[in-house]
Image (tube, rainbow, N blue to C red):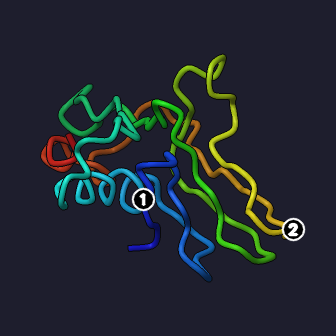
C-alpha cells in the first residue's frame, strides 16, 4: 500500500517516498480493503464514488471520487511533488474546505499536482462495468 489510513484523525497519510497516487487504486480500492481489517468499519466513510455507468456498448461515464466526512490526504514528511491521478474532489467543501490535502507536520515544501480527466465519457478499455462494480 502507498498510504496509511488513520481513522481517528480522518487522514490518508502518504507513505515515505511515494510521489504518485492513483485515486482509484491507491486511495479508493485500498481504503475499501482497510475497512475490512479489524474494527476499521467503525470510522466514518473516507470516500464515495460515482460513474462507471455504461453509456454505449463501448463507453462508460468517467469515475469521480469524493473525500467525505472531513477525510484529507497528508503527503509524506519531506520536500517533494505529489501527483494524484484521477478525478478527486471534496464532499461538503463548505464544511471541510476545498483542498483534498493538508500540510505535512514538519516544515517541508510539497507541491500537489491533481491530474484529472476532462473527458466525461471513457472507452471501456480503461474501466469496465465489472471493474466498477468491484469498486463499489
Is 66 on the left-hand or right-hand side of 95? Answer: left
**23 or 90, which lies in front?**
90
Q: Nearer the viewer, residue 110 or 34?
A: 34
Q: In which quarter of the image is residue 85?
A: bottom right
Identify the residue under disc 1.
5
Quadrant of the drawing holding the C terminus: top left
SS under mark 1: strand
Point 41% across, 62% down: residue: 26
Of residues 76 and 134, the one drawn nearer to the viewer in this rendering: 76
Above or below, 110 against 96 in this view is below
Q: Where 28 sits versus 93, above or below?
A: below
Horizontal placement of 92 versus 36: left or right?
A: right
Q: Dot 2: few (<14), some (14–19), or many (≥20) neighbours within 10 Å?
A: few
Q: Residue at x 40, y 41 (%)?
A: 46
Give residue 84's quadrant in the image. bottom right
Residue 10 lies, in percent from the top left, at 49, 45
Query: How many numbered marks are there?
Result: 2
* Element type at mark 2: loop
Q: In the rendering, at what x and y percent does residue 120 appear?
A: 47, 30
Q: Distance between the residues labelled 1 and 2?
A: 22 Å
Which callout, 1 or 2, points at the residue further toward the start of the chain?
1
**32 up-or-down from 77: above or below:** above
Q: Are marks 1 and 2 in contact (CB under 8 Å)?
A: no
Q: Which residue is drawn at 28% across and 54% down?
A: 125
The residue located at (62%, 27%) in the rendering is 96
Quadrant location of the N terminus in the rendered image: bottom left
Report which residue position mark 2 lands on.
107
Mark 1 surroundings within 10 Å by alpha-carbon count, few (fewer than 14), some (14 through 19), many (20 or more): many
Amino acid at each position: 500500500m502507498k498510504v496509511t489510513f488513520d481513522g481517528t484523525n480522518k487522514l490518508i497519510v502518504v507513505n515515505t517516498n511515494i510521489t504518485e497516487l492513483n485515486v482509484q487504486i491507491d486511495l479508493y480500492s485500498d481504503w475499501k480493503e482497510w475497512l475490512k481489517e479489524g474494527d476499521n468499519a467503525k470510522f466514518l466513510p473516507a470516500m464515495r464514488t460515482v460513474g462507471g455507468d455504461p453509456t454505449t456498448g463501448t463507453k462508460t461515464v468517467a469515475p469521480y471520487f469524493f473525500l467525505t466526512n472531513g477525510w484529507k490526504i497528508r503527503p509524506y514528511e519531506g520536500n517533494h511533488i505529489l501527483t494524484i491521478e484521477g478525478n478527486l474532489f471534496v464532499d461538503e467543501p463548505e464544511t471541510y474546505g476545498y483542498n483534498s490535502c493538508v500540510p505535512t507536520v514538519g516544515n517541508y515544501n510539497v507541491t500537489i499536482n491533481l491530474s484529472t480527466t476532462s473527458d466525461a465519457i471513457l472507452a471501456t478499455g480503461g474501466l469496465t462495468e465489472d471493474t466498477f462494480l468491484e469498486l463499489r
